Image: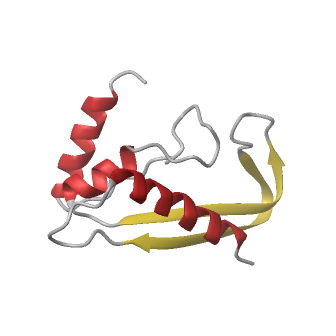
Amino acid sequence: SRGGSEALRQCVCTLEGGQSVGIAADGPRGPRHQPHPGAAVMAVRARRPIVCVVARAWPCLRLKSWDRFEIPWPFARVRLSYSEIPIPEGTDPEIDALQKEIRDRMDAIAQEK
């Protein structure tokens, strides 16, 4: 919302410096499971892959917020699933297509058993 362009610029510099950044692809306000263009733009500008990560916990307290945030109970099992989306060298992928790929990968790894 505010300061997004500056945050994007700093994240790209961080990525170009060889470090990693983590963001919620659906943003701080949603809609849920709909990635915003920030992750795709960062990956293309910095020429770094996107690693999609999904966490599931059980048992957990699921909040009634827009994102249904999960808080694991003590001694809960937590499952992390991930998938990498490489950015091909020498090409600039379409941001909309990359957003769709992020959404599809997140959906696929969330459905894994």
Q: In this rendering, would 46 be left or right of 63?
A: left
Q: Nearer the viewer, residue 30 or 74?
A: 30
Percent of width and height locating residue 10: 23, 40
Indicate how the structure is coloured in the image. Answer: secondary structure
Q: Residue at x 38, y 50 (%)?
A: 39
Q: Relative to residue 104, is residue 4 depicted above or below?
A: above
Q: Nearer the viewer, residue 100 or 11?
A: 100
Name the image quarter holding residue 99: bottom left
Q: Quadrant of the C terminus?
A: bottom right
Percent of width and height locating residue 11: 27, 45
Q: In this rendering, would 90 be left or right of 67?
A: left
Percent of width and height locating residue 48: 26, 64
Q: Residue at x 40, y 59 (%)?
A: 98
Name the image quarter holding residue 19: bottom left
Q: Residue at x 25, y 72 (%)?
A: 88
Q: Quadrant of the N terminus?
A: top left
Residue farthest top in this picture: 2
Q: Residue at x 28, y 31 (%)?
A: 5
Query: What number of labels is visible?
Result: 0
Residue farthest bottom in this picture: 113
Q: In this rendering, would 15 be left or right of 50?
A: left
